[in-house]
Amino acid sequence: MSALHRIHACVYRSVIMLKADMFRMMDITVWPLVAFLSTALFAAFVTTNKDVLTMIILSTVGWRIVYNFQIEPAHIIMEDTWSGSLEQLFVTPIRTWELLVGGWIIAFIKTIIVALLFVGVSTVLFSFSMPNMNILVLGLLASIIAGMAFSLITLGIAILKGPNSYGFLYALIDAITVVSGVYYPTTVFPWPLHAIAQLLPTTHAFNLLKQAAHIGEASFLYLILTSMLWLIIGTLFCSWAVTRARSTGRLVRMK
């Protein structure tokens, strides 16, 4: 069996489980839409500035991109833990990078569904029109890369800590997103927190999305440097976590 077959197997199984489980379907329909509308409708109440509404729409899409890409690879581990089939997963020839790619493909599919939902609702309710497309594409790509970097850390934590880590992993990206200034400039934070925000690739990805809506301006230098930094940190951490879990027998005791 080739790497492509193993990646396809990960994706196929996740799609089947997505269609069969109402909880998973709500995670890409009702819940993100409620979160989006609660913010967008409030913004429409306090301002008629179309750029603000556009920024909220784009930033919410960016938030979901980072969330989906960050959690999906670890979600594969979670599913096998909950179903009691974790040992079967680890005796297959699947490699860590194949599991990651499979998770990222599912994250991309979910993101497309959520983005189309947001754009459709925004067009009807707020007369949404596409902003600067070049900057928008760069901002979306930057959000994907940030989500990938954090997914390496998330997967490593899930492998090391098992079920005890899952609540933390779901909350982690929300905390990172808040610190990254998803709807506001990070200058609103006190200096130490503002400095930390500048080290996160999500901060600069969200700034690109704001720039696409003609609000603020992003630093491409910081975006490139922080993205590379967290990809390196994530790769090293995930590799260490897998090696550590294997050497201690943690993988088969995750349940």
Image (cartoon, grey):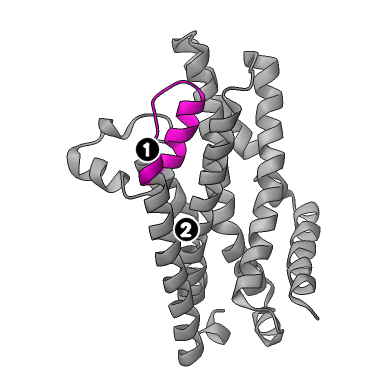
* 62 left or right, relative to 193: right
Res 39 seen here:
no
* 37 left or right, relative to 210: right
Determine if the magenta segment contains residue 15. Answer: no
Q: Which amino acid does label 2 sit on?
A: Phe
Principal secondary structure, stretch drawn in magenta: helix
Q: Give the range drawn in magenta.
A: 203-222
Residue matched to label 1: 219
Query: Is residue 118 or residue 148 the one in the foreground?
Result: 148
Q: Residue at x 38, y 52 (%)?
A: 226
- Among the two numbered marks 2 and 1 on one chain, the one whose residue lies closer to the N terminus: 2
Residue matched to label 2: 150
Q: What residue type is labelled 1?
A: Ser
Q: Residue at x 59, y 51 (%)?
A: 68
Question: CA separation, marks 2 and 1?
Answer: 20 Å
Disc number placed over residue 65 in the picture, else none:
none
Q: Tag 2's secondary structure?
A: helix
Q: Position of residue 7 (x, y in %)?
A: 73, 69
Q: Position of residue 56 (x, y in %)?
A: 51, 26
Q: Where is residue 158 in the image (x, y as percent from the top left)?
A: 50, 70
Q: Tag 1's secondary structure?
A: loop
**In the picture shown, does residue 255 fall above or below 204?**
below
Q: Position of residue 172 (x, y in %)?
A: 43, 54
Query: Is residue 169 or residue 147 the one in the foreground?
Result: 147
Residue found at the far left of this picture: 191
Res 226 seen here:
yes
